[in-house]
Image (cartoon, grey):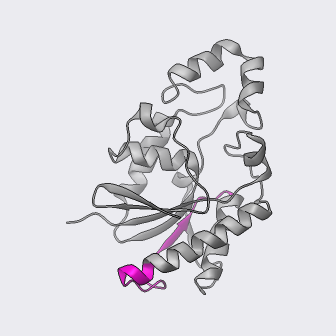
Amino acid sequence: MPMPTIYYIRHGETAWNAEGRLQGTLDIPLNDRGRAQASHAGHVLADLFARDGLDRASLPYVSSPLGRARSTMELVRRVLELPPGDYSLDDRLREIGYGVWEGSTLAEMQLADPELYAERQTAKWTMAPEGGETYATVQLRMRDWYDSLLVDTVAVAHGGTCRALMVSLGIETPDSAADLYIEQGTVYVFRDGGLTKYS
């Protein structure tokens, strides 16, 4: 049986994204640019549905429970002329937890703990700061989420969870995904074992 197609959208930009700060599980709202990116992703999605002959109202929509993802989802659904709040939440889609590093820039992390920062540069997939989680752990929960899907699905989540999904599906390796930039205002389509980006 073919696996469902995933229309995956990273949340729009926040002030912390613009400053290069790790957000992790902290709830930082979208900025003006982020709201525009979310609406743009909605238009991209509408075009994809038209191309694929899909009824936009027939697919399930699921979001990370974090506010920046939920706001993005609601803006996407407004563009699609669907009830903004009519979607589900799944905690497996939440962003990777950065523990004590949440709120820090990379430069601040390096200054605060040079040894741990150096370890992160060489083992990003398998190490975690105090109170955080590894990408390997996120990969497992994203695979669990993927395996639970029964039909084509629209998901709004995060950069970290997108990288983890790519690795769990064999599209990227931990090394190639670790520093891969996940664009905002873009729709990533996971289909038939491959990935195509539309912006």
Where is the N terminus found, in terms of image quarters? bottom left
Report whether 127 appears left or right of 15. left
Q: Check the image and report above or below for 157 versus 106.
A: below
Which of the two residues, 177 or 143, is positioned nearer the viewer here? 177
Residue 135: x %, y % from top left: 50, 36
Residue 37: x %, y % from top left: 66, 65
Q: Identify the residue at horizontal 73%, vertical 24% (top origin).
A: 109
Q: Which residues are magenta?
A: 49-66
> In terms of secondary structure, what is the magenta stretch mainly?
loop
Q: Identify the residue at horizontal 65%, vertical 35% (top origin).
A: 98
Report whether 37 appears left or right of 137. right
Report whether 145 appears left or right of 11. left
Q: Check the image and report above or below for 158 versus 173.
A: below
Name which quarter of the figure residue 32 lies in.
bottom right
Q: Identify the residue at horizontal 36%, vertical 84% (top origin).
A: 53
Residue 188: x %, y % from top left: 47, 60
Residue farthest left in this picture? 1
